[in-house]
Amino acid sequence: MNIASVIVDVPAKQTDRAFDYKIPSHLKGVIFPGMRVVVPFGPRKIQGFVTGLKAVSDFQQLKSILEPMDLNPVLNQELLNLGEWLTEKTLCYKISAFQAMLPAALKAKYEKKLVMAENADRKLLPEKVCTLFQNAEEITWDDAVKGGALPLLQKEASNGNIEIIYQVKERVKKKKVKQVFAAAPSKKLADYLQNLPGNATKQKEVVEYFLQEEGSVDQKELFSLLGITSSTLKGLLQKGLLGQKDVEIYRNPFGDREFERTEPLSLTEEQRKAIIPILNSIEDNRHETFLLYGVTGSGKTEVYLQSIQRVLEDGKEAIVLVPEISLTPQMVKRFKGRFGDQVAVMHSGLSAGEKYDEWRKIQRKEVKVVVGARSAIFAPFENLGIIIIDEEHETSYKQEENPRYHARDVAIKRAEHHNCPVVLGSATPSLESFARAQKGVYHLLTLENRMNNQALPAVDIIDMREELREGNRSMFSRKLLEKIKDRLGKKEQIVLFLNKRGHSSFVMCRDCGYVINCPHCDISLTYHRYNQQMKCHYCGYEASVPNACPECESEHIRYFGTGTQKVEEELAKILPEAKVIRMDVDTTSRKGAHEKLLDQFQEGHADILLGTQMIAKGLDFPNITLVGVLSADTMLHLPDFRSSEKTFQLLTQVSGRAGRHELEGEVIIQTYTPEHYSIELAGEQDYDKFYDREMMVRKIHRYPPFFYISLVTVSHEELMKAVSVTEKITQYIQSKLSAESIVLGPVASPIPRINNRYRYQCLIKYKREPELGQTLKKILDNYQQEISAGGLTVSIDLNPYILM
């Protein structure tokens, strides 16, 4: 096998296939499928993935692999096959599929350098070029750009005097520490000690230390232990008495934390009934998908933990996915507490290096369980026994850029390969999953009661229009305020939730109604309180708030909408005695801030936890007895067929934070549309009724789960170009589909312009269209040249979760 098939790191239609490379004689027996290699490609050296080995090639003149980037394959055979499947399923390039499976640290970084050619005559070169190379053998591309010498250098490169070198580099280095050890035998050390002059006290201490201690010690530790400096050590190293070595260590995101070991809890009758079918599927090595539908606080996590326990006893491994926002430290605590060091954790709060180290622990089989966000579904386990997706309805399981996969689909695909169960858990399952469970495609398991048979909290829905009519202009209804005061008196805790999606603070003129929009996007600028700036959340444009209206010059220009900061200020005015912890993007952007704030709240350092989406899930604090939702309906008015479902889920999840232990809970939901069924039924916490109502609406309008949908979005700097391309695409799709399918469009996207690019889209609703994938692939291929020239973008999502 002296030829390798390699997928190169060039995401384009022409390169979306394996290229053959010769394996040079010194690398025979070293190159395996799933490894990353550096290969020559045109004038460059780039990274590639070996997908297979073979004895012969159809091509005569083959280039050779330059060097391997790994000692062991980073993708096993199952993941290589999964990459092929992802390519087909999401219409992405193979290279994008492989890269999505690896931590960012393993994506190559390319550095361009310029070096003087060996045969170049310095006397004939322009002075500016000579000066650049005066003190250096090579200069980086960035330095050349900064120095403004690029045109000159390019001219010299074409004359053959300058060479451009492409270097492939790893993004993250392995972390290493220096260790010191005794390099000479004890006798030699003892002799040296005898002959030491009396004033060499520090050297004496070091030698005595190594006569007593065996093995090596961290250099830093040695310095602090004996109070020595590097010069003392240097002398002993030079004499060959001590040695030094670099030892690789893991960056441990939880290094400073002790996790208290926990024991399995005894299961309730309901939990036992739910876990038995899962355990049977594990016993029989049988693939099955379960939907664990249990009300908030019914003990789903304990079912997960005990199922995993069973899998580990069989010597197999487990993947647990949790939504990005609710990767609450609480969840990590529960898994680390039960399974200790057998757990790796992967989420976006870790640095690239920490993620890389956690991934390597999995690859080296040093851990058995991985808990993480969406991308943890690609953990390189080879003996999976169970995959669990908690809060399976969460939209963060869908990736919004290429490859646009849904973690649930990948989980089911991997579980089929390993013959193991998938457990999807939620108190408010997505309509698609619940419909599949009703049809028997998934096996439905139900937990109807809370763990200690506590009642679900009582929910009160307050009509804010009534409050306004009666002269209450504040953001708190009278009832909510009264309840907050009552809880403060009883020393119980309160959670206030602000539903921010689609409802940010904007700047508007009170006289003429002018709203300040982003100059590059068709969307209003968001007001950021802490630096008095207006910001566009789509293209990053920033501006200061004007003193007068640009339209009518009135000075009554104010910001509207309720941000968390505004709520915090209002609370400080009305209830100065209340201690408030605010959790939003601004207060949790620093590493570990999320956890610190929650710990403070748990330890009772605050009465009120105020926050956005990130506090809606997974929190379990015994002292919370009141939950207030300040703005329930901001999501209802977004142009998205799932907005009622998302509103219902969010309100039910938030309500579930109250009264989870001994104390009874209460929930107050403030809204301007109390008659909407998703708000009414969230008040009753009745998922089944909501499911029936919403399914009727979906059926009438032909949306999932009755129809599949796909979305094609076209964007271009010229409006007419975007419209005409979308029109051609729509007509082509219509001509290829059956009469039952519906193609809507071309129509402007809900946000018609982002970053000076106009956006148009067409939506396809269909039941059975086996040819659709091919049709859409042809469209991408057809516009390939215009796309790679950078003027046009055509993106296709075969299962969109966001229609904006």
Image (cartoon, rainbow, N blue to C red):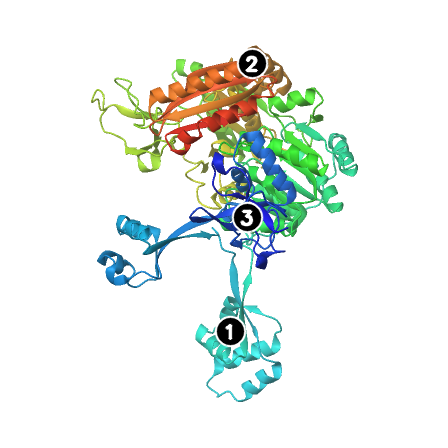
Q: Residue at x 32, y 56 (%)?
A: 161
Residue 347 appears in the rendering: yes
Which amino acid type corresponds to the residue marked 1 in the rendered image? Answer: Leu
Crowd around label 2: few <14 · some 14–19 · many ≥20 (10 Å): some
Nearer to us in this view, 804 or 559 = 804
- Across and down, in percent, residue 81 comes to 63, 38
Q: Earlier in the sequence, mark 2 or mark 1?
A: 1
Return the residue at label 1: 226
* Left or right, residue 471 beside residue 312: left
Q: Are marks 3 and 1 in contact (CB under 8 Å)?
A: no
- Across and down, in percent, residue 225 comes to 52, 70
Return the residue at label 2: 741
Q: Are marks 2 and 3 in contact (CB under 8 Å)?
A: no
Q: Residue at x 71, y 38 (%)?
A: 418
Quadrant of the drawing holding the C terminus: top left
Select label 2 or label 3 by which is in front. Answer: 3
Return the residue at label 3: 21
- Across and down, in percent, residue 652 comes to 57, 25
Q: How many marks?
A: 3
Which amino acid type corresponds to the residue marked 3 in the rendered image? Answer: Tyr
* Left or right, residue 416 beside residue 801: right
